[in-house]
Image: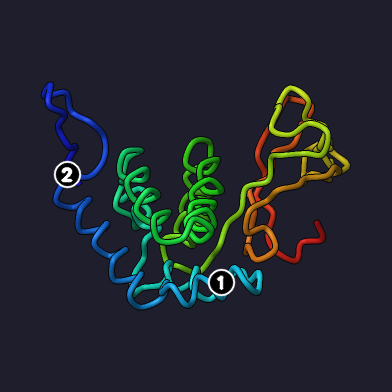
């Protein structure tokens, strides 16, 4: 997508106004088909996490997550303004579903910022294809989101030659939105070299 232009003619990263509106118009269709008032009230009354609906939003018929995935990995390369506009639109329909959906974006951010090309190809590609829910694990008991107080550790595992072959992670995390349903999480832990994010797949023993 071409950069959009601000009134000052300064180029801004993201979608042009027409493309962004097309994405926002999809929310109206989602409201009529999936997020009716009756459905939302039932979610609240029964304390339901609508996993099936969230995964439908990621599926090939809708693919809302493509907004924040770079084009190189199958997305639309939307910018912060585009994501903010979509969050606002979805929150006007259901705040809970909007939070759950954009927890996926939060979980993808460490890969977008610091992932290798191979990691981006694998994990961002999986998100773009609608195959994976991702969650973001940073907050800790007693530390909140204060990264200076981070206590979860990732201790390197080395082979006989001293080469690092993996990490053993120990610690506690809390308030992981969609964490109980995610196919993988991006988890922040302290290594001997400093804080780093790790991709943890579902069923890996965490």
Report the front residue among 39 and 21: 39
Report the front residue among 1 and 33: 33
Report the front residue among 195 and 8: 8
**Quadrant of the frame with the C terminus:** bottom right
Q: Residues within 10 Å of mark 2 (few under 14, many from 20)?
A: some
Q: Quadrant of residue 59?
A: bottom left
Residue at label 2? Answer: 16
| Mark 2 element type | loop
Rendering colour mode: rainbow
Number of residue marks: 2
Report the front residue among 71 and 65: 65
Please, is residue 11 above or below residue 93 in the view? Answer: above
Question: Could you tell which of marks 2 and 1 lies nearer the N-terminus?
Answer: 2
Residue at label 1? Answer: 50
Left or right, 48 with respect to 132, comes to right
Q: Measuring 56% from the left and 48% from the top, which residue is drawn there? A: 107
């Amino acid at each position: 997508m071409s950069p959009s232009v601000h009134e000052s003619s300064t180029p801004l990263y993201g979608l042009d106004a027409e493309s962004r509106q097309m994405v926002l118009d999809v929310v109206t269709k989602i409201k009529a088909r999936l997020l009716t008032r009756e459905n939302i009230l039932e979610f609240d009354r029964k304390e339901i996490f609508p996993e099936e609906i969230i995964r439908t939003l990621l599926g090939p018929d809708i693919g809302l997550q493509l907004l924040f995935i770079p084009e190189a990995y199958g997305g639309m390369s939307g910018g912060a303004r585009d994501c903010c506009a979509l969050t606002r639109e979805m929150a006007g329909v259901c705040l809970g579903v909007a939070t759950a959906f954009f927890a996926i974006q939060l979980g993808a951010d460490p890969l977008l910022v610091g992932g290798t090309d191979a990691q981006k190809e694998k994990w961002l590609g999986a998100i773009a294809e609608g195959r994976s829910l991702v969650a973001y694990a940073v907050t800790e008991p007693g530390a909140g989101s204060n990264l200076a107080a981070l206590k979860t550790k990732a201790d390197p595992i080395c082979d006989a030659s001293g080469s690092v072959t993996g990490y053993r992670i120990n610690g506690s995390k809390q308030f992981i939105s969609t964490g109980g349903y995610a196919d993988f999480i991006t988890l922040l832990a302290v290594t001997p070299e400093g804080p780093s994010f790790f991709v943890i797949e579902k069923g890996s023993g965490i």
